[in-house]
Amino acid sequence: RDGAWRGAAEVLIGNWTGTSTVPSRSLYPHQWSWDSAFLAIGWRHLSPRRAQRELESLLGAQWGDGRVPHIVFNPSVPLGAYFPSPDFWRSSAAGAGRGAPATVETSGIVQPPVHALAALLVHEADPEISRRRGFLTRLYPRLARWHDYLARRRDLGRGGLAAVVHPWEPGMDNSPCWDGPLARIEPAEPGTFRRADLDHGAATDRPTDLDYGRYVRLAAEYRDAGYDDAAAPHGFAVEDPNFNALFIASEYALAEIAAEVGAAPAGHLARAERLTRALLDRLWDAEAGVFRCRDLHAGGDGLIPETSVAGLVPLIVPGLPGPVVDALLRTLTGPHFALGDRTGLAPSYDLRGHAFDPSRYWRGPAWFNINWLIERGLRLQGVPERADALRSAFLRSAAGSGYAEYVDPLTGEPRGARRFGWTAALTLDLLG
Ligand code: DGY
């Protein structure tokens, strides 16, 4: 094992709390939902037990209605260390009607459903210990209820996809895709909350105060509606191709998990196929060669005219029509994403887009989880040389940046937090 392996392993071990892994000791000191999935995918190479524990602790905080919260709070971390803290979300009180757990505090929103895919990969790393511990048998019903929540409660557009109701839900908080839908949201008064992220991260790497005001308003409105999807105003409601592509990949994984635990896979396969058809019908922009986000409150088709890497993540979806795959590959390697140039990584947003910013969070920087997904997508779609090149670029940038949260896609300069959990975890996975 070389230095990159040891460096990445040290980050994971240093971020482990005993039951889960913090994305960052400073900026994100609790458990985050999609982070946990990527962290488990890395942990499986070091300790299949910890990988299982990571997912079990997250799903242990699942709500009665099936939702998996985007943050599970660690009660030993001081309230001021992260905002919005448990006293903002008030999950056990405000979410009681939706079955929020009484013994642990969580947020009330969700993040992309990568968990079933992660659970399958964790199982495959050591099937024997997984079977002995009944890992998939215990997780399967929880994962199935999580997917049912998304399919039944979040199809706000009634077109067969899951909608997100807050910019933190798709995981790409300040993507330029949200600028239009967010413009309608009245920001919370600046003096009514205090950002903790700026204590740990450079302001130029983070979302703006105006964005934060809107994030706070939307979360407070959802909370005040008891986190009830039928009753909440949902001033922000968007169908996102990254979120739904991960839903599809996880639904296929759930079919395999069902078969392993002796349940019926057919319903999962049928849902994955339905979701794929809806993704193509509702979000594919053939002219641009990319999947778009759809704003459910806009007129017309609602397609948001911004080109985000979210629109390329569907490369991980099996069974896409050939012309769609060809167009996605052209977009990925063409001037808007220039995969293979400079750092070799895909940026989070159109290099030629009017809002491109190489430093600011999801408005341009290259992220390691997304590049890991694209690497996987390239293999699935039968372009292994491209996947190999991306793998090398990922490993170079991750170790070279001190396992940064994200990097400038033009120079590779580290941005955001360092010793970041999923950057280290996915390094271990690619070193395999
Ligand atoms: C943050 O706090 O910046 C997260 O992205 C929201 O979950």
Image (spheres, rainbow, N blue to C red):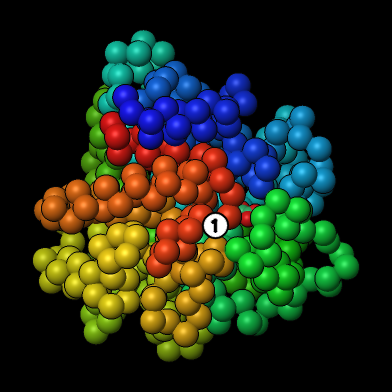
* Nearer to us in this view, 350 or 409: 409
Q: Position of residue 263 (x, y in %)?
A: 30, 29
| Residue lying at 38% horizontally and 81% vertically, measured from the top left | 352
Q: Residue under circle 1?
A: 415
Q: How many circles with numbers are drawn on the protein?
A: 1
| Residue lying at 70% horizontally and 33% vertically, measured from the top left | 74
| Quarter of the image where one finds residue 237 | bottom right
Q: Position of residue 342 (x, y in %)?
A: 32, 65
| Rendered view: 28 above or below 383 | above
Q: Position of residue 196 (x, y in %)?
A: 76, 53
| Rendered view: 182 above or below 277 | below
Task: Give the residue furthest to the right.
Answer: 191
Asked if ligand 1 lies within 8 A of label 1, the reply is: no
Viewed as shown, does residue 413 lie left or right of 323? right
Split into quadrants, the picture shows ligand 1 in the one at: bottom right
Dot 1 alpha-carbon crowd within 10 angstroms: few under 14, some 14 to 19, many 20 or more: many
| Quarter of the image where one finds residue 429 | top left
| Residue lying at 30% horizontally and 60% vertically, measured from the top left | 344
Q: Which image quarter holds the N terminus?
A: top left
Q: Secondary structure at mark 1?
A: strand
Q: Is residue 379 visible?
A: yes
Task: Give the residue furthest to the bottom.
Answer: 300
Q: Is residue 141 visible?
A: no
| Residue lying at 71% horizontally and 74% vertically, measured from the top left | 210
The amino acid type, in three-letter code, at marker 1 is Arg
| Quarter of the image where one finds residue 136 | top left
Viewed as shown, does residue 325 lie left or right of 19? left
| Rendered view: 316 above or below 329 | above
